[in-house]
Image: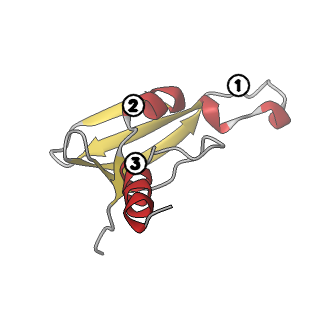
């Protein structure tokens, strides 16, 4: 394999990064959507698993996450919606 092909594959893998890992956990707390060029921050996560349901059946795919966009807009997404919507992201480090 040629070095230029390796660089292309590396660049392609870098560009196509979903916000969720394979086990449906969130990869970054703050990220930039490369499709819209907006920065999002996950500000809260709530499970929809009922209190009367068995605890070992609780999965992170049942969570609802509140995201805040850089312009102040807040929206709630399920993990399935996050997986479909934020397919092309990169991590943003927050200065404190």
Lateral position of residue 70 relative to residue 23, left or right: left
Q: Which mark is residue 50?
A: 1
| x and y, in percent, of residue 24 in the image | 60, 40
The residues tagged by marks 3 and 2 sit, at their Cα atoms, a distance apart of: 10 Å
Label whose residue precedes the other's in the sequence (3 or 2): 3
Question: SS class of the residue under badge 3?
Answer: strand
Q: Nearer the viewer, residue 59 or 16?
A: 16
The residues tagged by marks 1 and 2 sit, at their Cα atoms, a distance apart of: 18 Å
Q: Which residue is mark 3?
A: 42
| x and y, in percent, of residue 54 in the image | 84, 29
Q: Nearer the viewer, residue 96 or 38?
A: 38
Q: Which residue is mark 2?
A: 76
Question: Looking at the image, which residue sits at the far bottom?
Answer: 96
Question: Looking at the image, which residue sits at the far front?
Answer: 2
Lateral position of residue 88 relative to residue 56, left or right: left
Disc 2: CA contacts within 10 A as few (<14), some (14-19) or many (>=20): some
Q: With respect to residue 64, does 68 lie above or below?
A: below
Label whose residue precedes the other's in the sequence (3 or 1): 3
| Residue at (42, 67) in percent of width and height | 3
């Amino acid at each position: 394999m040629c070095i230029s092909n390796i660089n292309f594959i590396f660049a392609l893998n870098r560009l196509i990064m979903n916000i969720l890992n394979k086990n449906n956990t969130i990869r970054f707390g703050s990220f930039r959507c490369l499709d819209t060029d907006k920065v999002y921050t996950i500000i809260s996560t709530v499970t929809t698993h009922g209190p009367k349901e068995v605890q070992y059946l609780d999965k992170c795919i049942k969570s609802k996450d509140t995201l805040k966009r850089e312009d102040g807009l807040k929206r709630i997404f399920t993990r399935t919606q996050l997986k479909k919507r934020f397919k092309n992201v990169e991590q943003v480090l927050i200065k404190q």
